[in-house]
Amino acid sequence: MSTPTAIQAQDLVQYLSSLGLNPQQISQVVYGLYRELRVSGSLTPGSDNMVHISEEKIRQMAKDPALEEALQALALSVQKNKNLDFIFQKGAKASAPGTTHIPQVSHNPYESTSTLPEPAETHKDSVVIHNLDSFLHMTLLGYVDGETIKAFAAEQELLNA
Amino acid sequence: MLKKIEAALSKFWMDYGRTIQIKGAHTEILIEPKFFISGQLNPEAAELLVSVYLSQITPEDLAHGKVVVEEGTLKINDKFGQCVAEVHSPRILREFASRLGI
């Protein structure tokens, strides 16, 4: 393992560019550093506000497919939810918003590849039916006769009572 | 009775192009939702029923109070003026309002 280099946060992107990384890889490494910083805090020994990281580690992060996947999942999730509240939440283990954790497929040290975006829109409560009998009469009458609807609604009422 | 209503909903679902057909060489699979979940009408089916019903509503029906839109809610009333269902889906409300120019 090569010796860690101490880099000022504001110089980080220039430093990564100097290593020949492309913009996608730079984003990926910045995200990877951010994750490590949150998880272990080990990148700023002595709290000197500098990022201590070796070139080898940077190249490893730039090529890490799990990290790439995690970054994409996070970006998609935030775009979909348009919610940045998670940024202000405490705790290193916080998942990206709008994601569901699936422990059995968790294999990634950067934690969020094991997440799936939740459905964007829910149909729950979009239609509240107060009278099933009348509702079906008004909407489904061409497909089934009125007597059947009436009997069915009465049956449902009994079941729900 | 449930079977008859489910069959009617299935036909309705198919007529409005929601059924997914997977055709193989020797088989064909139709995918449709479970129309009643724990005794309640599947919300997706309810949405389709409402959308189709609203597509037939005329400005006269609106004037007669068959449908009332107020504060982001659309109420579907029966012939006695009793509220049968409430619609909160922004998509359905938007489509209805834009069709009737409300």
Image (spheres, coloured by chain):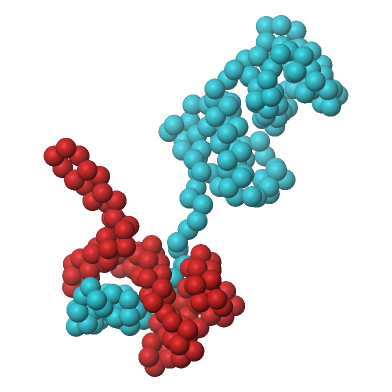
Chain colours: A cyan, B red
B26 or A13, which lies in front? B26
B14 or B77, which lies in front? B14
Image coordinates for residue A28, horizontal then vertical, percent: 65, 26
Name the quadrant of the N terminus of chain B: bottom left
Image coordinates for residue A34, horizontal then vertical, percent: 70, 30
B20 on left or right of A1 = left
Q: Residue furthest left?
A: B26
A64 or B59, which lies in front? B59
A159 or B60, which lies in front? B60
Residue A109: name its quadrant.
Answer: top right
Name the residue at 30% across, 68% down: B39
Q: Residue furthest top?
A: A2
Image coordinates for residue A139, horizontal then vertical, percent: 32, 76
Name the quadrant of the C terminus of chain B: bottom right
A94 on left or right of A51 = left
Vertical position of residue A96 compared to residue B8: above or below: above
Vertical position of residue A131 compared to residue B9: above or below: below
Can see residue A157?
A: no
Name the residue at 53% across, 68% down: B94
Can see residue A34?
A: yes
Residue A69: name its quadrant.
Answer: top right
Image coordinates for residue A77, horizontal then vertical, percent: 58, 43
Name the residue at 46% across, 91% down: B64
A57 on left or right of B69 = right
Residue A20: name its quadrant.
Answer: top right
